[in-house]
Amino acid sequence: MQNHQLPEYDVVIMGAGFVGVCQARHLMLNIPGIKVALIDPRPEKRTEKDLKIGESTVEIANLFICKELGLYEYMIENHPPKFGLNFHWPKDPVKTGNIDDYYHVWTNRQPHLASSQLNRAKFERDLLKMNKKMGADFYNGRVVDVDLAPGDELHTVKVKLNNESIELSAKHVVDAAGRKFIIGRKTDNVVFGADNLYGVNTGSAWVRVKNVDRSIFHSGYDPNGASCSHYYATNHWFGHGHWLWMIPTDTQSMELSIGVIHHHNVIPANHINSEEKFKNFLKENHNILYQLIQSGEPIDFNYLPRVG
């Protein structure tokens, strides 16, 4: 295994997910000539394995993406619009087979500020390509260590690239590696557990499907109730010890994300942590969503035992 010292950077960003690629673009748009490097163990070509939760932007995030990153046209052309938030509560928990079995709070018009639903894999892939065209370097490797130097000394990021090890020097280091908490772990500045999260102790299961029969959810015809799409909102469904999301993430492949956030003290992980268990949960508690999933083609299933 060889070790190589590479050029000095102004900023090294550890992680090329949503945060990392946005940070890189923002820096390069605002500081001409800045030298930026991005590190991520995933290749430039993202796949279904790179899809993750966090697919619905709020207005301030969408404003940042479009206004500060200059991506108005890109977002319009590549990611579904979001027509606000809808909320659904079952009138009777044992009867949830169609939309009339729920009480609702619907968005009835286009919100004043636009927002979007995201296909995260597509967004991250496309922005990484844009960043490289703007001059950023991308290292397809894994950060194995980071040495944080005092004062104005250069920091060092150690990276494993296949059978080669490299060291990147930088004036600034950004931890955009998500749940890996690289700098947090390095500085012993990460806390876990419900006691440190105001008692929050939740997990999440979700599926993605495509080409569903969306008329199972709503016919799309509501001339007296709304002047916007109900389907292309972020739809929330509620029940004892849980809530669910329903988010259309891609208008070209017609993908839909449906997932649950559950309280462990109400719904144990082993009741919901497989695709079969999750579908059974939906069948019993939100049958309309079960029917929707069954009408489409499965893409994937995921489970996170800890969300916070």
Image (tube, rainbow, N blue to C red):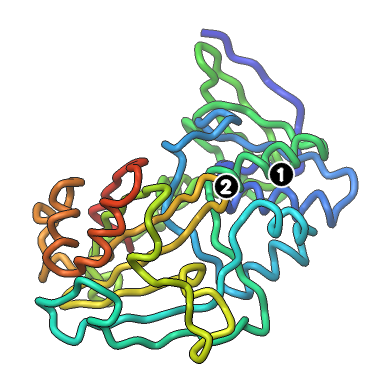
Q: Residue at x 69, y 62 (%)?
A: 65
Identify residue for label 1.
11
144 w.r.t. 56: above or below: above
Amino acid type, residue under disc 1 in the picture: Val
Going 61% across and 56% down the picture, which residue do you hit?
A: 79
Q: Residue 183 bears which disc, if any?
A: none
| Res. 218 visible in picture | yes
Residue lying farthest right?
Answer: 32
Tag nearer the camera, 2 or 1: 2
What residue does disc 2 label?
252
Going from N to C along the chain, the mark reached first, 2 or 1, is 1
The image quarter containing residue 157 is top right
Kind of residue sitting beneath label 2: Gln
Relative height, residue 189 to residue 230 (above, below): above
> Residue 114: horizontal and vertical position, in percent?
66, 74
Q: Is residue 123 left or right of residue 301?
A: right
